Image (cartoon, grey):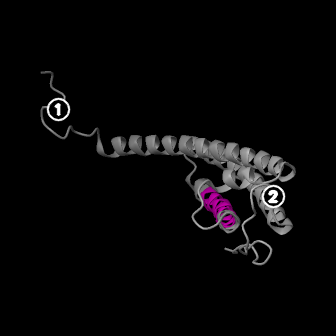
Amino acid sequence: MNRMAAPAAGAMDEAPSPGAALPRPALARLLRDGQADLADYAVLDGLLEQQFHCALRHDGSQMDALAQRILEVVERLDERRGVRRALAERLLGPGAPGGMAALSARLPASQRDAVQALWERLELAVRGSKARNARNARLMTEQQGMLQRVLHGAEEPLYEGAHAAP
């Protein structure tokens, strides 16, 4: 796994005052990483769709290969999220609340619009991927439950009279 470099020190060490432009390298990194995230979320969505269809077909060998590819994409996304978080903390100050929303709100309009539009697209991509992942998890959990019932029979109630009418 290759690690991405943390934001460079120097021009990004000082938190911008409200309405001040982000240092050019910081803004370029933020936008470049955001575009890379959007591309990786598109890849992730495709992999999650493949995973869903493999689960429907009970194709275990393909599921293993997909799981590895999904993990690789998620690791890249997580690395960039960590860089973005460190950048926001560096620019806003340690412990400052609000993350990217607070950062973009402090930017001049010329930078704010681009950062906010990118952030909204990223949030939408994250929600879509989470929904696909949850759908896949529900399907696989249901399949696992059915397999357990086939192999071990229906579960007995925990207490003898659990299903008896009062």
Q: In terms of secondary structure, where does tag 1 sit?
A: loop
Q: Residue at x 65, y 42 (%)?
A: 128
Q: Nearer the viewer, residue 13 or 128?
A: 13
Q: Is residue 82 magenta?
A: yes
Is disc 2 in contact with disc 1, using a CB cutoff of under 8 Å?
Answer: no
Q: Is residue 106 above or below residue 1?
A: above
Q: Nearer the viewer, residue 125 or 20?
A: 20
Q: How far from the left and from the top, in percent, is residue 31?
A: 81, 58
Q: Nearer the viewer, residue 104 or 134?
A: 104
The label shown at residue 122 is none
Magenta-highlighted residues: 65-84
Residue to which mark 2 is pinned: 31
Q: Residue at x 84, y 68 (%)?
A: 25
Q: Residue at x 71, y 47 (%)?
A: 46
Q: Is residue 129 above or below residue 162?
A: below
Q: Nearer the viewer, mark 2 or mark 1?
A: 2
Mark found first going from the N terminus, 2 or 1:
2
Q: How far from the left and from the top, in percent, is residue 19?
A: 79, 55
Looking at the rendered structure, the kind of residue marked 1 is Ala
Answer with the quarter of the image where residue 40 lies: bottom right
Magenta residues, dominant SS class: helix
Q: In terms of secondary structure, where does tag 2 sit?
A: helix
Q: Is residue 25 above or below residue 125?
A: below
Q: Nearer the viewer, residue 7 or 96?
A: 96
For the C terminus, the image quarter is top left
Q: Is residue 94 magenta?
A: no
Residue to which mark 1 is pinned: 162
Q: How far from the left and from the top, in percent, is residue 23?
A: 83, 66
Looking at the rendered structure, the kind of residue marked 2 is Leu
Horizontal relation, residue 24 to residue 101: left or right: right
Q: CA distance from mark 2 to mark 1?
A: 58 Å
